[in-house]
């Protein structure tokens, strides 16, 4: 399992764009938790991915308007 | 947000605010189709100072707006009503996303109180566009309308350009408020904004020094950055072999001695061979999709890749690179040029001279006696076109023949739907190009299949008397699919036969467009009728819309061809 923390501005559709980057690859979500964190929002995703997909996902998320930071949890 | 004027403002409706904001963004032309949810918008159109082009289908509006944007680099604007009007925009939005075209789509929505009730002509177009639009907003009240519009234009045109969607409920269009004069949008900073990292001259120098077969691959990023002149100067100094993707055509001078032609599925033999053999690949603004790479696991197998790219999401999408140079090519190409005196240069003269000589021979060949009539015809047409003409190609065999044969002199001289490959693109896109560039000779090259997908736009062309030159390469088949069926499915031509096509000349005439037909003539050496030259002269010189049907044999194929899933080195050069 891979765990990702994504900080984003809670504008319309940003969370959905983060999620469609996953669903367009036919991957299943093991866990999705989205919460307000101060002046921004954060979503925690748990996914089963292979290394190439991890890099692709992170790049897609970083290219999404209003995504602020993408981190992978150990 | 900066608002230049914070004094009291006259009350304006949401509809009037939309037009005012479009004017403030420099928009002079929009493409659209009215319907119930956008009647207030159209009611406020008169006096807005904006020209509205009524297309005959919303997909036509999206593609026309794309043509306008692709030919100018400015934002295209398309308008549609809620429900089916909005869904008809989707193919255009997807196309703009794939090909990085700045496009602002404005849709009407049912009134706010009805949203979510499955009201008449209600569809969640905001949700539907999430996977394909770069950004979008469902406007909730009139107060946020100016900010949303300004943000939309900024996002559509900044970074890697793309489509955005603004969905406006009809009650927001009808509402009235005292709103400020639009100011300049200031985007909030993000942690991953592209800054100006130092140019990695040392790493690049080391890579160049050890290269024996270096090659440059140029994509659409160069024209999107407006960096074609800087590119040409750089390439002249680098003097390395260089090839182009379909969207990079025209960035490199076709006369340049180092130009190898187009690469990819229907690229030149030389370009594809060199890409397969290279040990150092400098990619300038290309995202390396599968039509360029063939099997990505076997693309440039011995190469280290240096990727100049504005969009970090495109780096290493299909192949790991040795070095990434992130940023607009408008910045990084001049940085590359400035660093050149300090860079070590590869020792590859003998190899370079050999591949460039092979390319000159290949690109200069007219195919001799084996050239297809369609190619001969396109060659004659293109030779007669003015240098600053624009070819707008649809999708299919004619598209690839045109890409192979047209020698675009500028990067916005060849326009086509490359990433999405949307049949029906060319006719509406060509009318958008002609409106943006009224002085230009605009030639729409379509097939008999794609032409019928947006045939209704003949009415738009006629209404505005746009002198678009429409060529239909009519082989009475869905030619590219048929080619695949011939080569890979044992000639099982399932559902690709269009032998019952309508009379296109009669259709053109019915729309009031001067129309003409030419057919292959087996009695001539070239296969072209003797009057071809005079027909083409009239076709190109006309100041009114023209339709020309060129009937050609059905079983003609596009070569070279890299079969889907094969490596570039496995291209087919001719019929087996």
Image (tube, coloured by chain):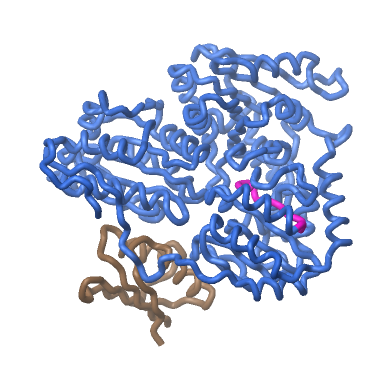
Chain colours: A brown, B blue
> Residue B315: which quarter of the image?
bottom right
Task: Note whether residue B532 is visible.
Answer: yes
Q: In the visual, does B367 lie left or right of B419?
A: right
Residue B37 picture quarter? top left
Please state the total of marks drawn on the protein image. Answer: 0
Give percent across and percent down for residue B291: 64, 53
Residue B244 on the magenta segment: yes
Residue drawn at point x = 31 percent, y = 27 percent: B49
* Residue B493 appearing in the image: no
At which x and y percent is residue B86? 33, 40
- Please state which of residues B203 and A70 is positioned toward the viewer in this rendering: B203
| B28 within the magenta span | no
Q: What span is colored magenta in the figure? A: B239-248
* Residue B502 locus on image (x, y percent): 57, 20
Residue B23 at x, y = what percent?
31, 36
For residue B439, which quarter of the picture? top right
Q: Residue at x 20, y 75 (%)?
A: A38
Residue at image x 61%, y 37%? B413
Is B34 above or below relative to A25? above
Residue B494 vs residue B304, the one in the foreground: B304
């Amino acid at each position: 399992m891979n765990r990702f923390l994504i900080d984003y501005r809670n504008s319309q559709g940003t969370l959905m764009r983060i999620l469609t980057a996953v669903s367009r690859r036919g991957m299943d979500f093991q866990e999705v938790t989205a919460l307000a964190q101060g002046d921004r929002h954060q979503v925690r995703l748990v996914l089963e991915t292979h290394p190439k997909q991890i890099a692709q996902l992170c790049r897609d998320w970083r290219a999404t308007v209003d995504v602020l930071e993408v981190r992978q949890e150990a | 947000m900066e608002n230049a004027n914070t004094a009291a403002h006259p009350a304006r409706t949401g509809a009037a605010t939309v037009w005012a904001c479009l004017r403030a963004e420099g928009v002079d032309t929009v493409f659209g189709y009215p319907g119930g949810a956008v009647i207030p918008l159209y009611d406020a159109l008169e006096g807005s100072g904006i020209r509205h082009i009524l297309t005959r289908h919303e997909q036509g509006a999206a593609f026309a707006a794309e043509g306008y944007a692709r030919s100018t680099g400015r934002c295209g604007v398309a308008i549609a009503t809620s429900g089916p009007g909005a869904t008809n925009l989707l193919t255009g939005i997807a196309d703009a996303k794939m090909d990085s075209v700045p496009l602002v789509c404005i849709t009407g929505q049912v009134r706010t109180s009805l949203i979510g009730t499955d009201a008449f002509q209600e569809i969640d177009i905001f949700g539907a566009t999430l996977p394909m639009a770069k950004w979008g907003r469902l406007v909730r009240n009139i107060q946020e309308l100016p900010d949303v519009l300004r943000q939309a234009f900024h996002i559509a045109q900044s970074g890697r350009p793309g489509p955005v969607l603004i969905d406006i409920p009809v009650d927001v269009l009808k509402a009235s408020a005292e709103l400020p004069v639009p100011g300049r949008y200031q985007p909030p900073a993000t942690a991953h904004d592209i800054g100006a990292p130092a140019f990695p001259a040392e790493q690049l120098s080391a890579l160049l020094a050890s290269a024996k077969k270096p090659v440059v691959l140029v994509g659409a990023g160069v024209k999107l950055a407006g960096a074609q002149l800087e590119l040409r100067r750089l390439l002249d100094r680098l003097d390395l072999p260089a090839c182009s993707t379909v969207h990079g055509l025209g960035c490199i001078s076709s006369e340049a001695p180092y130009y190898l032609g187009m690469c990819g599925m229907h690229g030149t033999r030389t370009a594809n061979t060199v890409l397969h053999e290279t040990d150092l690949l400098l990619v300038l603004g290309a995202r390396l999709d599968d039509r360029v790479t063939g099997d990505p696991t076997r693309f440039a197998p011995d190469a280290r890749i240096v990727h100049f790219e504005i969009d970090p999401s495109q780096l290493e999408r299909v192949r790991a690179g040795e070095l990434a140079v992130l940023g607009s090519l408008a910045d990084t190409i001049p940085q590359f040029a400035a660093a050149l005196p300090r860079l070590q240069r590869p020792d590859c003269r003998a190899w370079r001279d050999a591949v460039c000589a092979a390319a000159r021979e290949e690109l200069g060949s007219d195919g001799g006696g084996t050239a297809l009539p369609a190619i001969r015809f396109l060659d004659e047409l293109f030779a007669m076109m003015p240098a600053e003409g624009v070819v707008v190609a649809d999708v299919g065999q004619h598209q690839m023949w045109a890409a192979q044969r047209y020698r675009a002199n500028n990067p916005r001289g060849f326009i086509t739907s490359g990433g999405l490959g949307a049949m029906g693109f060319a006719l509406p896109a060509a009318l958008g190009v002609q409106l943006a560039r009224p002085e230009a000779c605009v030639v729409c090259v379509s097939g008999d299949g794609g032409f019928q997908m947006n045939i209704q736009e003949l009415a738009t062309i006629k209404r505005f008397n746009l002198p678009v030159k429409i060529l239909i390469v009519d082989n009475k088949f869905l030619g590219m699919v048929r080619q695949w069926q011939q080569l890979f499915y044992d000639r099982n031509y399932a559902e690709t036969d269009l032998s019952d096509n309508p009379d296109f000349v009669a259709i053109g005439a019915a729309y009031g467009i001067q129309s003409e037909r030419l057919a292959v003539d087996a009695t001539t050496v070239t296969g072209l009728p003797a009057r071809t030259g005079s027909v083409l002269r009239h076709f190109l010189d006309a100041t009114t819309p023209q339709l020309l049907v060129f009937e050609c044999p059905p079983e003609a194929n596009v070569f070279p061809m890299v079969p889907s899933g094969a490596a570039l080195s496995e291209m087919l050069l001719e019929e087996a």
